[in-house]
Image (spheres, helix red, strand yellow):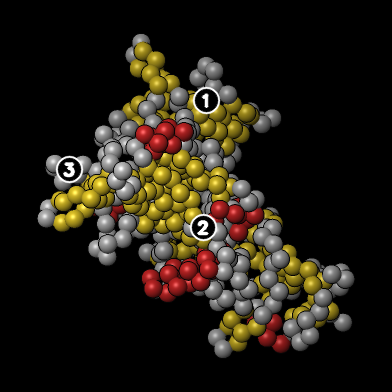
Amino acid sequence: MGTVIYKKLVEVRILQDFYLGAHDETSFFDLSGADRLIRLNNLLARSEYDIRKDLRIAPTEGTGTYFNNHRIRFITTATGFFLAAEVRAVESGGADRYQMIIPPEANPGWKFTIQVINPQFINFTNVIQAGEVSSAYFLSNLNPDSTKVYPSLSMPVVPFTMGETYEMGDLSIIGGDLRQALKQTASAASGWIVLPADHRWVNSSDRHLLSTRFRYAFINPSVNTAAFALSDTDGNPVTTVSSGDAGVTTIRNEDGDLVEMMVDFTTYQNGADEVTLSEGSYSLEVSENGAPVRTLNVHFHNDIAMGFAGILLQPKTADPDFGFLEDDGTTKGLLIRRPDGSHPVFEIRLKNRITYWRYYSVTSNELEAKNKATLFLDAPAASGFLVTKDPKSLQQEPVYFVDGGDKIYLPNPINAQIRPEPDGKLYSDIFLSEIKGLIENKI
């Protein structure tokens, strides 16, 4: 019997700044490629990084069956997962290559679900808490518009949109800079901080994965009628669902204004025929009271839309940076290798959440900042607590407070509980006794 050989086709790594960030709050992705690898390997060696504690990743039933039939193995790791296929050694173009024993018949889409199993994950990850549409994150190696940058699977952050409300932590392009919202805001003029680099983190541009039946929550007041017009990627109209259509479920407030609506594109009428909507990418125009208010690029995949995120991988892509199988004309299913001989490794980059930290006395005394602590903490009038002047990063390693040459350590949040407040900010509460010379009971 010959030797069975399995080789890695592709790997997906989920890299979370909450675990990877430094004491000074610099991102893991600010490091050089070599330093990132050292940092990650050190954490892995100490068992301090294992994304499986937070997320459950699995192929869909259809993808799992495909893998079984094509001798492909799905293997989870502390950083995500990889796919390995049974291969044979072949020659192609004068070079030694590996070919899948059972090559794909066409160019299938392999799909995976990501479910959150640690409730704290959403708290310490910079992801959207609300929004009009009950959508998930869509992460794929498809790059039809050539806007993605290898190895990140995320779409680019889009420019600020007038009329949209941004949550604290949201990312947007304003004045050509990548900025992060310091509170809930609908203005581009203030309440943002410039980030030093665009590391292609998961962002709102990725949050457009839907099942064909989804809930839409109306944020704008006094909406009496609504329509959802679906078009294909070439701009051709497909169908429209309106609030007044027979069978459409809506929730209205006591004034008769729309609060929620169930939008169902599962089937639609095409002349006399009832047609099932094909999965894939579409453009969705939302109109309120007869006027368009937003257009969304959406992805319908019922089998991966119900979790935190869904992944779609296609072996062969138009963008050579994102493919991991190719044909040479006579030999199908050849494994692609990077210039250094390694298999393609895609990344899902997660930014850690920022919050304002509030310090309370465990004895209910009023607290007062002293000496260097005054550089970092404010005392809101008649509150009794202290709060950071600027938001701080939630992360596994202790965060220091740094201002030029001044550097101090103050207690970090013990857990990742966050508290939204009416001022549009997110807070983390910390209870402590006095810290001599920094935080003391007010006399």
- SS at badge 3: loop
Which percent across, then down, holds residue 247?
Answer: 54, 18
The image shows residue 46, relative to residue 268, as above or below, that is below
Question: Would you name the residue on which mark 1 appears?
Answer: 243
- Which residue: 42% across, 74% down? 35
Q: Nearer the viewer, mark 1 or mark 2?
A: 2
- Which residue: 84% across, 69% down? 362
* Residues at discs 2 and 3 in contact (Cβ within 8 Å): no
Disc number for residue 331: 3
How many C-alpha atoms fall within 10 Å of the one at disc 2: few (<14), some, or many (≥20)? some
- Which residue: 23% across, 50% down? 89
Question: Would you name the residue on which mark 2 appears?
Answer: 78
Left-right relation of 45 to 276? right
Residue 40 is at least partly visible in this image: yes
Farthest left residue in view: 94
| Disc with the residue nearer the chain's start (1 vs 2) | 2
Observer-nearest of 251 and 41? 41
The image shows residue 417, relative to residue 261, as above or below, that is below
Q: Nearer the viewer, mark 3 or mark 1?
A: 3
- Which residue: 41% across, 63% down? 199
